[in-house]
Amino acid sequence: MIRGLYTAATGMNSMQHQIDVTSNNISNVNTMGFKKDRAEFQDLMYESLNYTAGQTSQTTTNPTGMNVGLGVRVSGVQKNFLEGDLKLTSNKLDIAIEGNGFFKITLPDGETSYTRNGAFKLDDEGSVVNGNGYKLDPEIVVPSNIVDLSIGKDGIVTATNPTSGDIVNLGQITIVDFINPAGLKAVGGSLFRQSSASGNPIEANPSSDQFGSLRQGMIELSNVKLVNEMVDLITAQRAYEANSKAITTTDSMLDIVNRLKR
């Protein structure tokens, strides 16, 4: 019966982690470019009270054995990079990636991070930056004396010189992809960093090979589905409650044993 107490406790701990992950998903339901998490679980080791295929006589063996599980543990948290819905904003610096790929962002320390959040802006020098002021890589500088900024599906950025009427090429936006995007390390701010699990970044122009295309004036929303998260939350809550009932039941049984001598 003592085993049951500890086994149910592992279930409560795991369901608490499930609720933590689900709560984070729900809190980011309106975060642009956010990718939902999914908690994954594994059963713990088993205590063999009678080994499977153990000898029961000289000519027979036990067909099933007697193995008692010792609970559950969290084995990982998986990022789901399913594309979120695209929302029309008509803001010329809002860019969504339709398909695979990430924008490259240069951090203040010179390191590179990656994001699906294409809500870009201009800094005081005319450089295209994200909401934290981190520059897009390759850097795109938009002069103050141009109009009709246009970003093509292939990432080519152009504008019109109002004086001469000429089309000015401002640069090329590239995107990157990874063999295993789920291996990227989330660092907050809708940013990810490369890890040994993700593999090296593969950079190319949008609309080429397996890469997605760009959509100017649109933004990618969170891929969190609120209804699904509420179902997961209720399921985790009921499982947590069931494990607490198992602890209460085991405690009641121990109390009965302790009162046998009275």
Image (spheres, rainbow, N blue to C red):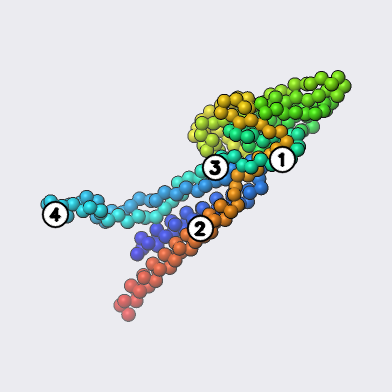
First-in-chain label (1 vs 2): 1
Q: Is residue 76 visible?
A: yes
The type of residue carrying mark 3 is: Asn
Residue that numbered label 1 is attached to: 88
Residue occupying image coordinates x 66% and y 47%: 30
Q: Nearer the viewer, residue 213 or 53?
A: 213
Q: Label 4 vs label 2: CA separation? A: 46 Å
Circles 1 and 2, Cβ within 8 Å, touching? The answer is no
Q: Residues within 10 Å of mark 4 (few under 14, many from 20)?
A: few
**Nearer the camera: disc 1 or disc 3:** 1
Q: Residue at x 54, y 42 (%)?
A: 79
Quadrant hosting residue 84: top right
Q: Give how far apart the Cα atoms at labels 1 and 4 are.
A: 74 Å
Tell me the number on the disc at residue 80. Answer: 3
Marks 1 and 3, the one that precedes in the sequence: 3
> Residue 152 at x, y = what percent?
70, 27
What numbered label is drawn on residue 235? Answer: 2
Q: x%, y% of residue 16?
A: 51, 56
Kind of residue sitting beneath label 1: Leu
Residue 59 vertical position relative to residue 142 in the rendered view, above or below: below
